[in-house]
Amino acid sequence: MTSNQSRPPLGSPKLTFSADAFFDTQEAPTGLEKKRRQAQQFVERHSSEGRKVVLVTSGGTTVPLEQNVVRFLDNFSAGTRGATSAEYFLAAGYAVIFMHRQHSLSPYTRHYSHTTNPFLDLLSEPAEEDSKDGSSPITVLPQHSSALKPVLHNYHSARKAGTLLRLTFVTVTDYLFMLRELSQVMQPLGKRGMYYLAAAVSDFYVPSQKTPEHKIQSGKGSLMIEMDQVPKVLKPMVQKWAPEGFIVSFKLETDEDLLIPKARNALERYGHQVVVGNELNRRKYEVVFVERISDGNFKESWIRLDPQQDNSVLGKAGEKEIEEDIVRNLEERHEQWIKSAQS
Ligand code: 9Z3
């Protein structure tokens, strides 16, 4: 690890934290090399079989406050957007690298989340006299079978085809290192690679050099924490890591008036293809696609579902999920992007 001399001086009026300085001063997560190899094999295989590959990031990133972590800050996200979208990408024929926060929702199993739909509630025990030797099967209650069948079928299909690779992160540092590594692994896909950045990424972190080793002790009054800004990695991603890729970032706001200006600003600054904007409380039935048409000119297109629909139960059978429309829309845009390479 090197010292953080390359950081811009604190207190400079326009503070920018470069991605290079971040990667030079923070330690790569253990197991990164193994994940890179897994991703490389996955990409090579699916690319040779003619599949498009999408990297879906999902779930919130943490910022540890201690090296032996007892406390950490977290970003809001259950991983619903990412896990649901991954299912629709798989259904559309993509191979999916699902880079997600450990223990957040995953494709297919999300339908049986322990809080909303515990899987033990679906099962019936064999009668006691039938199960003396333990060989009688546990069965799915008939009222749950029809909802379970398509989920199980799609889960098995993805497993059989080997089209889903799940890789986990926990901290924002893990996330950034993995994003760089996986984008570079996907670079040979050129325009056939899509990057769907739905994870909720912290804007601030505590550099490891400033993180205390042991649990912060109370008794000294209030706790002051100084955090550095997380580097904006979309810029190196667009310019260096995946220059031909189709890059979709998400913008989350709680003040709806900020959504479109911030999305436009991101497109202007980083030069990627699309920002999907969502307001926290309406994210399950309303999103906006923002794209840059020309210098200073942008186009917005909204997708809206009926807000009366009960979206409170994740993936409830038969209910329309907004991710279906998001993925269909992006798949079309991605096809156009690929064609634009050929013309
Ligand atoms: C999103 O905006 C996601 O759609 C949600 C999904 C986190 C709202 P859930 O997992 O929630 O379905 O519960 N993700 C991106 C959030 C983010 O960190 N964006 C950064 C920003 O807004 C830019 S990359 O500044």
Image (cartoon, helix red, strand yellow):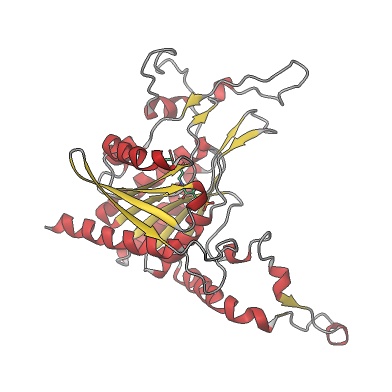
- Decide which of 36, 211 is in the foreground and name it: 211
- Decide which of 130, 42 is in the foreground and name it: 130
Residue 130: x %, y % from top left? 84, 87
Please tell me which residue is depicted at 49% across the width and 57% down the height of the picture: 284
Residue 320: x %, y % from top left? 47, 69
Please tell me which residue is depicted at 18% across the width and 39% down the height of the picture: 295
- Decide which of 127, 218 is in the foreground and name it: 218
Question: Is residue 92 placed above or below 192 in the rendered structure?
Answer: below
User: Visible in this render: residue 47?
Assistant: no
Tell me where residue 71 sits by quadrant. top right
Question: Is residue 119 placed above or below 141 in the rendered structure?
Answer: above
Would residue 342 appear left or right of 41 to someone viewing this image?
left
Please tell me which residue is depicted at 58% across the width and 52% down the height of the picture: 104
Would residue 204 appear left or right of 287 to someone viewing this image?
right
Please tell me which residue is depicted at 41% across the width and 58% down the height of the picture: 42
Question: Is residue 300 placed above or below 12 in the rendered structure?
Answer: below
User: Visible in this render: residue 147?
Assistant: yes
Residue 321: x %, y % from top left? 47, 65
Residue 134: x %, y % from top left? 82, 80
Q: Residue furthest left?
A: 343
Tell me where residue 92 sits by quadrant. bottom left
Number of labelled discs? 0
Q: In which quadrant will I find the C terminus?
A: bottom left
